[in-house]
C-alpha cells in the first residue's frame, strides 16, 4: 500500500476519532446550564423581579387577608396564597422568563451565533431547563420560608404529599418551559411587544387561576376558561399539598389530581409540538 493510500485510509479513522472525542449533548448542556445560571443571576433586576415579586405579593396579600375563611375557620386565606403563588411563581420562572429571555436572545442574534457553533441544539435547551429548575426551586423555597415564618404554614409530613408536589412541580415546569420556548417565537420584537404577547396573558391567568384571587371567589365562567390552561391545575395541585383542608372550597369538593396530571401532561405534549413547529433560531427580519 502506498503512502497516499495509507493516508487516505487513515483520514476517515482520524475524523471518526475526532468526532468521538467531542463531548455529548448532555455534557455540553450541563456546561451550558452553568453559563445560563451565571447570566441569570448577574441580571439583578430580572432576578429581583422574578424571585422577589411573588414573595412581595405574598407578604402584602397575606397581611391583608390573614384571617381565617368565614365558612371554614381551619383554613387561613394566607395559606391559600402561599399555594397559589407557588404555582404562579413556577410558571413565571418557566413560561414568562424563558419566553422573554429567548426572544431577546433571538433579537440580539445570540441564537444565530450559537447555532453556528458545534454545540448541539439540544445542549442549548438543556442549559435553559437547568436554569429554570434552579430558579423555580429557589422561588418555592422563598415562598415556603415566608409562609412558615410569618403565616404559620404547616409543611406536609406525609411522603405522599411531597410525591404529589414533585410530579405537579415537574410536569408544571416541563409544560410551561416548552410553552415559553414556543411563545418566544410569537413577538416580532421582544423589546417592543414581548410584554404584551407573553406577559399580559400570564397576568390575566394569574387572576382567574387562584393565584391572586382565591379560586372560590372567581366567577364560574372565568374558572371554566382557566381550567383550559395549566396554571389553574398547578395551583390546585399545590393547594392539595400545602392546604389539604381547603378541599371543601374546591369546585366539586375535590382537588381532581388525576385530571391535573392529564391536563399538565397534555400541555407538555402540546408545548413540545409547538416548539418543534414554531421555534426559530433567527428573527423574522433575518428571514
Image: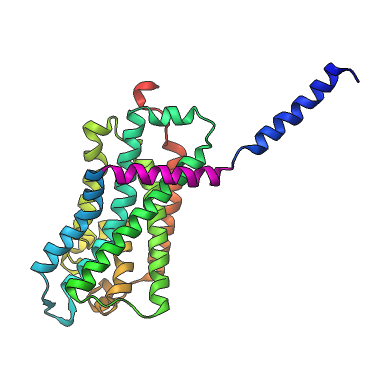
Residue 117 vertical position relative to residue 69 in the rendered view, above or below? above
Using the image as rendered, state which of residue 164 and residue 111 is in the foreground: 111
Principal secondary structure, stretch drawn in magenta: helix
Q: Position of residue 68 (x, y in %)?
A: 13, 78
- Side of 48 relative to 113 (left or right): left
Q: Is residue 253 left or right of residue 278?
A: left
Q: Position of residue 82 (x, y in %)?
A: 23, 67
Left or right position of 285 against 277: left
Identify whether 31 is placed above or below 192: below
From the top left corner, tell me how far across and down residue 123 is, in percent. 50, 42
Quarter of the image for residue 56 reads bottom left
Q: Quadrant of residue 140?
A: bottom left
Residue found at the very far right of the displayed protein: 1
Q: Residue at x 29, y 34 (%)?
A: 187
Viewer-proximal residue among 254 and 19 = 19
Which residues lie in the magenta part?
24-43
- In the image, residue 65 lies in the stretch drawn in magenta: no
Amino acid at each position: 500500500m502506498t503512502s497516499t493510500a495509507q493516508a487516505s485510509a487513515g483520514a476517515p479513522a482520524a475524523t471518526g476519532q475526532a468526532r468521538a472525542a467531542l463531548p455529548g449533548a448532555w455534557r455540553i448542556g450541563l456546561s451550558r446550564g452553568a453559563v445560563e445560571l451565571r447570566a441569570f443571576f448577574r441580571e439583578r433586576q430580572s432576578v429581583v423581579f422574578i424571585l422577589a415579586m411573588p414573595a412581595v405579593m405574598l407578604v402584602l396579600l397575606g397581611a391583608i387577608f390573614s384571617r381565617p375563611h368565614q365558612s371554614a375557620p381551619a383554613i387561613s386565606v394566607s395559606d391559600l396564597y402561599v399555594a397559589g403563588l407557588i404555582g404562579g411563581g413556577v410558571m413565571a420562572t418557566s413560561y414568562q422568563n424563558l419566553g422573554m429571555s429567548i426572544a431577546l436572545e433571538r433579537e440580539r442574534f445570540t441564537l444565530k451565533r450559537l447555532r453556528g457553533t458545534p454545540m448541539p441544539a439540544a445542549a442549548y435547551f438543556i442549559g435553559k431547563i437547568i436554569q429554570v429548575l434552579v430558579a423555580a426551586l429557589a422561588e418555592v423555597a422563598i415562598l415556603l420560608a415566608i409562609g412558615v415564618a410569618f403565616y404559620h404554614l404547616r409543611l406536609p409530613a406525609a411522603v405522599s404529599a411531597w410525591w404529589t408536589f414533585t410530579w405537579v412541580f415537574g410536569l408544571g415546569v416541563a409544560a410551561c418551559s416548552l410553552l415559553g420556548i414556543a411563545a418566544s417565537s410569537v413577538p416580532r420584537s421582544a423589546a417592543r411587544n414581548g410584554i404584551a404577547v407573553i406577559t399580559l396573558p400570564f397576568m390575566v391567568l394569574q387572576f382567574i387561576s387562584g393565584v391572586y384571587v382565591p379560586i372560590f371567589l372567581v366567577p364560574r365562567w372565568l374558572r371554566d376558561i382557566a381550567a383550559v390552561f395549566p396554571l389553574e391545575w398547578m395551583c390546585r395541585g399545590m393547594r392539595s399539598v400545602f392546604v389539604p383542608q381547603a378541599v371543601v372550597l374546591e369546585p366539586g369538593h375535590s382537588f381532581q389530581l388525576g385530571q391535573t396530571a392529564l391536563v399538565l401532561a397534555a400541555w407538555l405534549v402540546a408545548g413540545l409540538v409547538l416548539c418543534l413547529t414554531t421555534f426559530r433560531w433567527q428573527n423574522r427580519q433575518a428571514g
